Amino acid sequence: MSKGKVYLVGAGPGDPKLMTVYGLECIQKADVIIYDRLVNQDLLQYAKNEAQLIYAGKEPGKHDNIQEQIHQWLVEKALQGKMVVRLKGGDPFVFGRGGEEAEVLVKHGIPFEVIPGITAGIAAAAYAGIPVTYRHLATSFTIVTGHVRSKHGADSLNWRALADGSDTIAFYMGIGNLPYICQQLIQHGKDPETKVAIIEWGTTMRQRTVVGTLQNIAEKAEGAGISHPAIILVGEVVKLRETIQWFPELEGEIVDTK
Ligand code: SAH
């Protein structure tokens, strides 16, 4: 039997309409779809009736065996000649372990394609009315994991470089570490008054945004009960939200005047 093919597809940040046309075509044709927890499950309605849908959800902090299992499914289904879609939240190559999955496919000689998606750090910011770059205000943008502390308390981020070298920073997977992240940035020279936005469930009907500074955002986010998934966006661009905010959020921060 001839080998199938695997498509590593970015499902976009949450709103199902934010996925690519090519990604959607792949969902429509797939024999097998292996999808993650943060993928909007409304997208699965486009699958063929006979398609096999496999949930590969990873709870934060409980990743241990599932990744191995996903590799096995990818290889096994493709070797059966199937067209396999590996559907991942946001972009498959941004903190999605998509790179590792591609390596496994290479190792087994399985053909594959990578279909990028809109990553949460940019999309959630946009839906909160925050451009991640802006002329004169922010000329660089960095994507960073906020899941930084190892069991032994040390982390591998270059905090000094982050504090000095990037105008806008998006921390992914960082909400559990928010006080630590703010403290590190301040300790490494970032102005404590630097603006921060936390965007929870960005681009979905559940989107909420809390705005503060490095000094007070942890308390504000806790007060608002913000939790996973959320992007921590640090930088002066956050203040543009005052003028550009356009998406009606859960907490009704925008009053619809129509
Ligand atoms: N590949 C994904 C990121 C996976 S890591 C992408 O490119 O977007 C998971 C992290 O992404 C979460 O911890 C959270 O920080 C962020 N995230 C994913 N979806 C989100 C959403 N709708 N709103 C805010 N943050 C989100």
Image: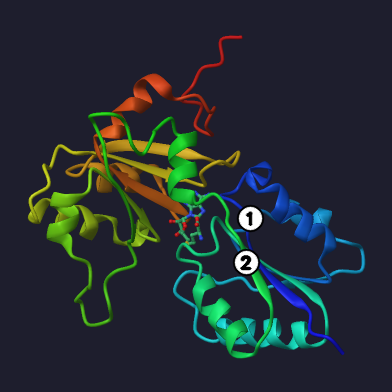
Q: Position of residue 204 (x, y in %)?
A: 59, 42
Mark 1 residue element? loop
Spatial CA span between label 2 and label 1: 10 Å
Q: Tag on residue 36?
A: 2
Question: In the rendered view of the protein, which quadrant contains the C terminus?
Answer: top right
Question: In the rendered view of the protein, which quadrant contains the N terminus?
Answer: bottom right
Q: Position of residue 135 (x, y in %)?
A: 28, 29
Crowding at mark 1 (Cα within 10 Å: few <14, some 14-19, many 20+): many
Q: On screen, 113 above or below 129?
A: below
Query: What residue is shown at x 21% (from left), y 42% (from top)?
Result: 216
Q: Residue furthest right?
A: 49
Q: Which of label 2 and label 1 is nearer to you? A: 1
User: Which of 135 and 196 lies nearest the eye of the viewer?
Assistant: 135
Q: Residue furthest top?
A: 258
Please indicate, yes or no, whether residue 44 appears anywhere in the rendered image.
Answer: yes
Query: What residue is shown at x 51% (from left), y 26% (from top)?
Result: 252
Please indicate, yes or no, whether residue 184 appears anywhere in the rendered image.
Answer: no
Crowding at mark 2 (Cα within 10 Å: few <14, some 14-19, many 20+): many
Badge 1 amino acid? Ala
Q: Position of residue 182 (x, y in %)?
A: 20, 52
The residue identified by callout 1 is: 11
Mark 2 residue element? loop
Q: Are marks 2 and 1 in contact (CB under 8 Å)?
A: yes
Q: Is mark 2 within 8 Å of ligand 1?
A: no
Q: Is mark 1 within 8 Å of ligand 1?
A: no
